Amino acid sequence: MHAYEWALRCPCLHHRQYQRLRHRLKACLMSTLLVPLPAVAAASVPALPMAPCIKRGQQHWDVLVVGDEPAGVMTALELVDQLPRLTGLPHPRVALVTEADTRLGLGGKITRSGLAYLDRNQVPKDMWDVLSPFAPSSRLYERFLRLTGVNHIAVDRRRASTALAKALGQARIPMLSQADLVGVAREGRRLCLLQSRRYGSLGADLVIDASLGARVAHLAGVPFQGGLGPGELAHQSLALGWIFEVQGLSLHQVRVLEEHFTQRLLNPKDREAQAWIKRWPRYRRDPKQLQTDLLDENGDPQLAYSNTSDSADQRSPAMAIAFHGQSGLGTDWRQSRVRLDQANIALLPGRLSFNALLLRNNAEQNRLVLANQNRPLPWMRPYADKVTAFFKRHGAKRVEWMPELYVRSADQLAHPVAVLGEMEMANGGVPHNQALGTFSYFLDFRGGIKGIPGFPKPTFNYGYRHTLPRELDNLAVLGPAAGYGGLGGGAGRILELNISIGQGLAIASGLALADGMPLAAIDPVRVAQFMPPGFIAYGRPSNATRMHLVLGRIRYVLDGLWHRQDNGYWEGQQLGEAPKRRPPHLRPGDPP
């Protein structure tokens, strides 16, 4: 046992001595040893109470969640758990409304887009003695993994859709699908009504827009920053993906194919394979680079590597080179509209899910796809047919394409209450006392962005205030369209991060309803104090020294001890159970 743990637990200390030592240790660590994280700039927000909307709609809800993306579904479930505790409402009125046809699957990108390979929180190695490498970043994401049956990485779209629908039903959350939203009604700084061709006027005290493209926020006239940032970035967008599932090929057979293609590409007498290489400018200019990319340090072919039992990552471009060569397709975005990338492979029952096909994209086309319910555009189908032909030629029995594209980015809030951009992430994220948790992931611009180099992987504290537009008091935008400052969307697009943010947003919503105040007027420190224990913030600047990392780990352990003392209210709470009710003005740990 470490000395500081012994000191805090020692039974020889009287309660008053214990409290005095505890606070001295905390003050010493916070003020002397650790460099504080910079505060995130925030706009001034109105502090006046919100008057109820005059227009109530044909149906009225406490909170309307728009969009059936996983973050929206899980936030709706969290609202039903949090609102009774925070507002005293025994049966809160929460509904989920979406323009999608949920008969094709409930869960947005993990069902209709088929995103089976989940990008997980990548805990830094220096924290592995206290956290597992894929430790969930929030209790709500942990609940999502349990609901959908995820072991490590892979989520089965069929099982996930069934599980999410069942959870909504058990929570008595109505699902209003194929809503066809055509307009909104505002009263001053409040969004009061959504107009739906199918359901008429839908009123709500609060609205959480969790749709991929922030459909409701756009209808409400909230300003957005186009593309991926100012200047030339305004016209750019992350590549679209079209995920496909392959039956009749095992992972072993994929590796055999990779080895076969590698041998051909490295054989100078194989004229056909040498012609394939000429389609790749980087290898045409530097033949040695090809060998580096195809072989490992022992000179063996780099084959798909499995870090977990339910996933694999292609490390070699051999299969992509063979596909482009056999299909007669270029590889430079200036020459071709598609690229078969090194695949993220999810191992599902009886099939493999490939997240590999990238489609050239820009901001204008991205908006068109979002407006078209993420459905593939006509020019994309012939390329999918070429991929199908390639895999069937090499042993696949069936290739199934998902009904919707995987959209990675969207226009972002132009004026969020607080920005959570690439610079804020690199500096460690939001202040420790406002943090809902910590997330660590690369700013992943799959397909690349012209003129933008790579960034170090940030490990940052996340909050929720970047989801709040300054223009409206009762609206939040949850997802890639939130205020990520452009390039921050490289991490802000990740499903796990947005589900975790949704937990804090549900708490903020409960406090806003209880106090009758705008979302932006709720103190983020207060929201962080209501987050369940066990998910302690440990964000750090990307340039943190080794000493900072050591001290940060000590702080993490101490915070864990303090949280166990301060959050007895949460002890014994099980996921999905309704917590004990407590007046909204009290904080966790306060006497009732």
Image (cartoon, helix red, strand yellow):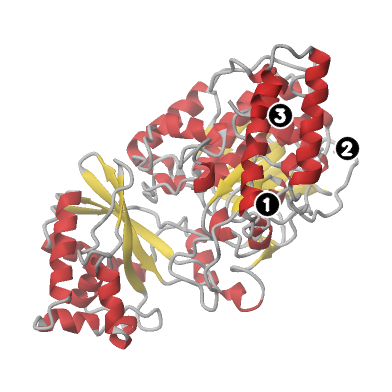
Q: Residue at x 66, y 43 (%)?
A: 551
Name the spot of residue 208 as percent of width and height, x first. Answer: 65, 42
Q: Is residue 197 left or right of residue 269?
A: right
Say which mark, if any, is on residue 581: none
Q: Quadrant of residue 24?
A: top right
Q: Residue at x 16, y 68 (%)?
A: 261
**Quadrant that contains the C terminus:** top right
> Which structural element holds mark 2?
loop
Number of marks: 3
Q: Is residue 50 left or right of residue 293?
A: right
> Which structural element holds mark 1?
loop
State how far apart marks 2 and 3 are (Cα): 22 Å
Q: Which residue, given by chain and number where applicable, does mark 3 sit on?
A: 530
Mark 1 burial class by Cα count in 10 Å: few <14, some 14-19, many 20+: many
Q: Residue at x 46, y 46 (%)?
A: 120
State how far apart marks 1 and 2 are (Cα): 29 Å
Q: Quadrant of residue 240?
A: bottom left
Asked whether the beta carbons under mark 2 and mark 3 sit within 8 Å of each other, the answer is no
Name the spot of residue 429 as percent of width and height, x first. Answer: 68, 51
Name the spot of residue 524 as percent of width and height, x first. Answer: 77, 40
Q: Which residue, given by chain and number where applicable, does mark 1 sit on?
A: 429
Q: Amino acid at mark 1?
A: Gly
**Quadrant that contains the N terminus:** top right
